[in-house]
Amino acid sequence: MVISMNLWLHFSSGYISLAPSLNFLPVALFELQMAPLRYISLVYSRPKAAYELQWHRGPVYLTEISLDVDADRDGQVERNNPNKGSWMWGPNGHGAILLVNCDSEHTCRKSLDSEHAEVTRVSDLKDMSPMVLRTSGPAKLPEGYKLTMHISQGDAECVRVFSVENPLVGGEDLSKEVPCLWGNAEMNFYVEGLRFPDKDFEGLISINLSMLEPSSQGFPETPIFTDRVVFRVAPWIMTPNTLDPVEVFVCSTTDNDPFLKRMRRLVKNSGCKLKICPEDMNRGDRWMQDEIEFGYIDSPHQRFPVVLDSPRDGDLQDFPYDVLLGQDFGYVTRTAYGKEVSSLDSFGNLEVSPPVTVNGKNYPLGRIIIGVAFPTATKGRNMTKVVQDFLWAQKVQEPIALFSDWLLVGHVDEFMTFVPAPDKKGFRLLLASPDASYKLFRGLQNGGHGQAKMFDGLGAEEITVDEILSDEKLKAENNYVQSCIDWNRDVLKRELGLDDDDIIDLPILFHVMENRAVAYYPDMVNMIVLGKNLGIPKPFGPKVDGRCALEAEMTSLMEGLGLSCTYIDDFASYHKLLGEVHCGSNVRREPFSFKWWNLEM
Amino acid sequence: MVISMNLWLHFSSGYISLAPSLNFLPVALFELQMAPLRYISLVYSRPKAAYELQWHRGPVYLTEISLDVDADRDGQVERNNPNKGSWMWGPNGHGAILLVNCDSEHTCRKSLDSEHAEVTRVSDLKDMSPMVLRTSGPAKLPEGYKLTMHISQGDAECVRVFSVENPLVGGEDLSKEVPCLWGNAEMNFYVEGLRFPDKDFEGLISINLSMLEPSSQGFPETPIFTDRVVFRVAPWIMTPNTLDPVEVFVCSTTDNDPFLKRMRRLVKNSGCKLKICPEDMNRGDRWMQDEIEFGYIDSPHQRFPVVLDSPRDGDLQDFPYDVLLGQDFGYVTRTAYGKEVSSLDSFGNLEVSPPVTVNGKNYPLGRIIIGVAFPTATKGRNMTKVVQDFLWAQKVQEPIALFSDWLLVGHVDEFMTFVPAPDKKGFRLLLASPDASYKLFRGLQNGGHGQAKMFDGLGAEEITVDEILSDEKLKAENNYVQSCIDWNRDVLKRELGLDDDDIIDLPILFHVMENRAVAYYPDMVNMIVLGKNLGIPKPFGPKVDGRCALEAEMTSLMEGLGLSCTYIDDFASYHKLLGEVHCGSNVRREPFSFKWWNLEM
């Protein structure tokens, strides 16, 4: 008699007695009632484990097969998690996590090709997500039966599965037989991500394991059982100024020794390392901020920094790949279509806010900030689409687009930054403010310091407070600049949930060149933030009683937050070249303690 | 004195006294303290309303500008909802909703082109989402200032905004000046969606309104203020068998009069309408199930049915566009790349489950079910990618892929359906089961009815129970079929959270032609479900005491659920052509009462 069977037995049901340790059932138990069996799916529970026992026909074998992953995100591959086949965000969520294996053991530039199909070092295995095939049952499957691991066409370009040192599925191979280790066995697999989430890839990947019955009498192979696990590829995460600095990167050039000297002292005082990119590597390109953005990827089993290489590709372009990429230091880039790269593609135009809450919605990893053209502009410059798409697709730091095209260089770091604060939201937004600058200058004039000179000691540059205040063209230009910053201020308040108390206006003037704005004196908001130490472009403001009035104002504004200001002379080597301290440096920071998979989306 | 101002006044703060009805502030109030003002953003609250009052320079005007939508989803456009600029799922969520204007007033086939840029009928306006620009302030803006509505390049192909009868932005036009109606005015806009969510379009659209200051002294126009609203395009939603039927569609052919007669009676008894597609329209293509799938789109302001036209494109291909598409009856289709359409692209291979809860996750609109090749197959047939992408992108009925390629025709409706039930989960999954059929036939044989004939009265087809049971080849074929169905059963249990009690096995045999399976006798699971009435292919099973044993078994299984079985002879006109009642019919159903935007994602 043939009976179709799909029998679920539970210990609690008392239907049949099974010892919890039993994972191979004697045939006789069943044969009395039903034979030959076609299919038995048997689940029993014990604390933190559920087992699915599978099948067979003929003389009855019961075989347990489970493809297991770390679906509960505790760093361990548990047995047959009932949620392993789906993915859910949040602290009560579930689903395994995959890293893009983009560090030096496994990276090739700008594309992933098959030559990298071998895992040559054991160190690389720890970047991969462990996956375990657990079997128990008879020592051997009946003739012709086989286990096959398979993935979809779409997923194949996003994932690769290794069996110890051999590639199994991924790339060209969608399906492969798994050599069976029967009896009670565990077989280890290692899974690596090949692609970050992007516009056309949400980040979810399924890996399937099927037992196939041999074909007979002209029928195709029949699937008897399929187990499935789901991974999400970890997003690339940026680090805001409020996170502790680890390493500071600057370039050495023929003309920046004094700058390096001040930076060295500041970095040392801040307790982190200074890494200097030598001239033979930077080839005179000093804009360390613009070529790269530091971030990281994180999973329950591994975490490492990943540098995003800008499509800007100045003379610093080889630095991230040749120097930064290393063991446990990943690399990712995006190549712009055609020649559509502009100054807005430099990563001085890519920042990230500290954690915020906006109308009840939490952003515990902050929000990415980019600068674009004003949307009504017909000929504006923008950050290139492929990079914007990449940033949006990471999802966990939902981007905000500001208007930065009003600036000649066009970077958001020219008018804004964030500093840590002991109170309120834990940070302040600093904004460049021509109005604050005019107010300060008028105060000086009213206080009898109209003849105090800016740019004192810089020779031909010198100009008095009275002269600045009487320059109607400069005033009109700064009215325009203030309007542009005010518009961004409004967006930032709305999108970050800020009050006016969360914002500090810094006295900074701009002037207009080629219809777009540049800083009139060193742009103090373009600072480097290292914990409580700020490295600020020395503004060379008018001196009152021997002290620079701009520095005094700046220091007074920051002191209240417990921050210490170091003014760094970048006038000749950066400011005159249309950048400042922030443009000329970069900081790798500690990752967030908050785990991205605990986000509630 | 110039002061940068961003002043927030609250009634509760007592800082300044404003009457709640006041929306134009006298200049003098402010001039004492600060003038000229550049920017004032003023918020005051009263029950259920928040107003943002804006700006001006020179002599002070305060102007309220708000672009408003139905962000609280109550069918009314409220004033300046603080959440109008973002979109959140769920009963506590927010964000306005847009319909794809795909009914006859506004549809063109397979692409949307500019010739449809005029709104010619008022009836069309109600398919669009209302949007209101509310202004109050001085009767006229100062010279040169203008309001501009603008959208992003990416959104332009997905949305169009009309100002009464004139297109404003969308398509080629990313930005347009809005004619200002000042004083206290309301200007109505109508927004239509142009694209359903898809692989490359999540469904979210932003519309911006900016006030621009005229350019002067060579500076570009300056944005003074931008207001933004966000819409989500409503997804296309399928309707499961558990929803009440409204209209039944069948084809009239030269050979199906008896079938039509039985259908007419069944449909009448079920209280819905029968629509017959005449032969000059169907050109002999009787597979009404396969050419189309009925669904609907829903918003707080409007709802209408939308037919998804299959890329199958048999001789019925003109029917959905020429007949179904109408006023308040939408149309959408997807065109396959190249020639990659197979039998799996017919919509007998596209079904939807009733609402389910799986491991605590709710699917109150059910889950879409499609059939594909078994994933390890190298030469399998699949539903074409563009249709799969479309279905996945709708998000609210997350699809499940079953294995249907083992069938010659390859449709999921050949081995499964859902019927309503008064108990448990509110439905049962019915599965074709060769094992159940063999069990029934063996029971007949054991009961002395081995000589009872199948296909009685159908002439050459007749065959006895004994002959069927002794056919070893048929048995082997059905073992294979049962394995394929069992595999799908396992997927359905896991993905729909079903127990064995939720599934009923129907006695159905298959046989194998060209290595793939077809029903051996009329496939009872391929039924039409009209409330409590089931229209079931008459199986022509062996007769015991004058009654068909298969019908008796089927009726007995359904009776317990309060369902009434009508057996319809489709043998010559459908079964012999490899389809049955379900393949030859289609049902438009009532929409869900559950609103898709209340889903928690």
Image (cartoon, coloured by chain):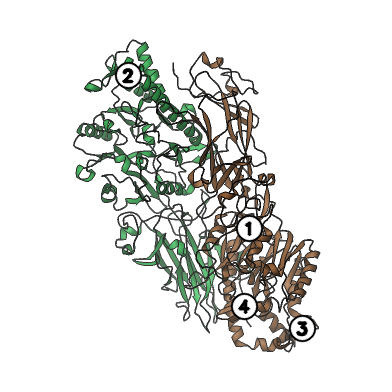
Chain colours: A brown, B green
Dot 4: chain letter: A
The residue wearing badge 2 is B549
Q: Chain of mark 2?
A: B
Which residue lies at the image location 57% right of the left edge and 54% below the top edge? A395
Q: Is residue B115 left or right of residue A71?
A: left
**Both labels 2 and 1 in a single chain:** no
> What is the secondary structure assignment of the residue under circle 1?
loop
What is the three-letter code of the residue carrying label 3? Answer: Lys
- Determine which of the numbered discs, if any, sits on residue A543 in the image: 3
Q: Residue under label 4, please give it.
A: A518
Label 4 neighbour load within 10 Å: few <14, some 14-19, many 20+: many
Left or right of A97? Residue A445 is: right
Chain ID at mark 3:
A
What kind of element bears circle 4? strand
> Which marked residue is nearer to the observer: mark 4 or mark 1?
4
- How far is the residue under mark 4 from the one under mark 3? 23 Å
Quick check: B366 above or below A4?
below
Badge 2 amino acid: Ala
- Please tell me how many numbered marks the rendered image carries: 4
